[in-house]
Image (spheres, rainbow, N blue to C red):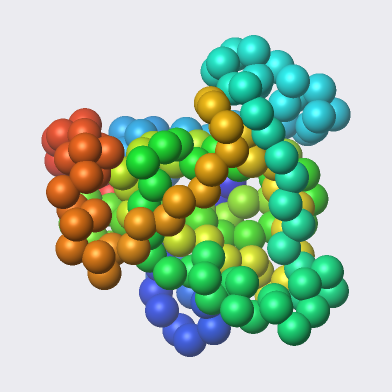
Amino acid sequence: MRAYIFQDEGDQRKPNDSKIEVSAEDLEAAKVSYRHHDGDLHTFADGLMKEYGFKNRDEVVVSRKGLGDRYDNMVKKFFEEHLHEDEEIRLILDGNGYFDVRSVDDRWVRIFVEKGDLIILPPGIYHRFTTTTDDYIHAMRLFHENPKWIALSRTDSTSEELDARKSYLNSIKKSVYV
């Protein structure tokens, strides 16, 4: 895993690297969890289901080849800043991409994920996702209950009033980023 402060340079699928690193410890302090596994990923997922009490999972492939004309619109949708009222849990089965999360001081932190990476974003954290210029990622989504993916846009002023957002902000006492 590599995480750093995002510096917008145009194409969202490029690294946009400021060269300001963010440590795994800083991400953990922000309630963002990360693990890497090199073995069989479906067996690893079975263990995660038991360890975290997940009840459901599915797989999603985001690729230019697979989505064709829908690809650009789908990637734009994922890149809109939003939060969820539930954890976002992704195990990368193949390919790569970027999760961007907001720091407490409102800067974007870019997290590069690739095959074998597990990332867990807490409820209430503003984030977004994009593929890299490889235009391909295959991920497993894990859920505590029935699968749902409800993105609540930051542009909707009510998102700041959600219990998930308030709980997240209360769990972060100071900015953990450089």
Above/below status of 95 relative to 54 = below
- Figure quadrant of residue 23: top left
Residue 69 vs 105, above or below: the answer is below
Q: Is residue 61 left or right of residue 130?
A: right
**Whole-percent x and y of residue 15?**
55, 71
> Where is 57 relative to 175, above or below?
above
Residue at 32 percent of width and 39 percent of height: 30
Residue 161 in sight: yes
Q: Quadrant of residue 18?
A: bottom left
Residue 33 x/y as whole percent: 47, 34
How far from the left and from the top, in percent, is residue 45?
A: 72, 26
- In the rendered image, the residue lying farthest to the bottom is 10
Q: Is residue 154 left or right of residue 74?
A: left
Q: Nearer the viewer, residue 151 or 116?
A: 151
Residue at x 81% of width, y 23% of height: 43
Residue occupying image coordinates x 39% and y 74%: 7
Residue furthest to the front in view is 146
In this picture, residue 67 sits left or right of residue 18? right
Q: Residue at x 42, y 56 (%)?
A: 151
Q: Is residue 108 visible?
A: no
Q: Position of residue 176 (x, y in %)?
A: 25, 43
